[in-house]
Amino acid sequence: MADAREPEPKEPEALAELTDEEREVLTKVAAIVRRIRFGTVVLVIQDGKVVQIEMAEKFRLR
């Protein structure tokens, strides 16, 4: 059965279509990813919008 969804847009086109809110979320996620060495980043989504970003950083002792 064929997939009825539209194909994913190419990278520059996809970035151009982002809202200011989506850009802000991605900027915050990127900052967190650059900051932590080990851990997790969780996005909490409600009604199709990111409402919370959770970060858990782990520290390796060895």
Image: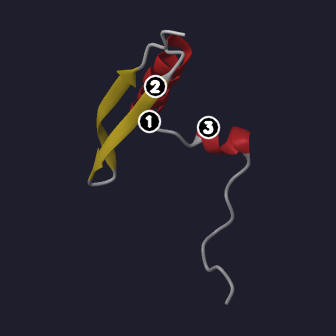
In the rendered structure, the answer to whether residue 16 lies left or right of residue 21 reads right
Q: How crowded is mark 2: few (under 14 residues within 10 Å), some or many (20 or more)?
A: few
Q: Is mark 3 on a helix, strand or loop?
A: helix
Residue topped by disc 1: 22
Amino acid at pointer 2: Gly
Q: Position of residue 38 (x, y in %)?
A: 51, 21
Q: Which of marks 1 and 2 is nearer the N terminus?
A: 1
At horizontal 69% and vertical 85% (from top left) the residue drawn is 2
Q: In which quarter of the image is residue 51?
A: top left
Q: Position of residue 17 (x, y in %)?
A: 56, 43
> How far is mark 3 from mark 1, CA to CA?
10 Å
Residue topped by disc 3: 15
At horizontal 32% and vertical 45% (from top left) the residue drawn is 49
Amino acid at pointer 3: Leu
Residue topped by disc 2: 39
Q: Which of 26 and 38 is in front in this view?
A: 38
Q: Are marks 1 and 2 in contact (CB under 8 Å)?
A: no
Q: Which of marks 2 and 3 is nearer the N terminus?
A: 3
Amino acid at pointer 1: Glu
Mark 2 or 3: the one toward you: 2
> How far is mark 2 from mark 3, CA to CA?
27 Å
At horizontal 67% and vertical 90% (from top left) the residue drawn is 1
Q: Where is residue 6 in the image (x, y as percent from the top left)?
A: 64, 69
Quarter of the image for the C terminus: give it.
Answer: top right
In the rendered structure, the answer to whether residue 28 lies left or right of residue 5 reads left
Q: Tag on residue 30? A: none
Q: Residue furthest front?
A: 62
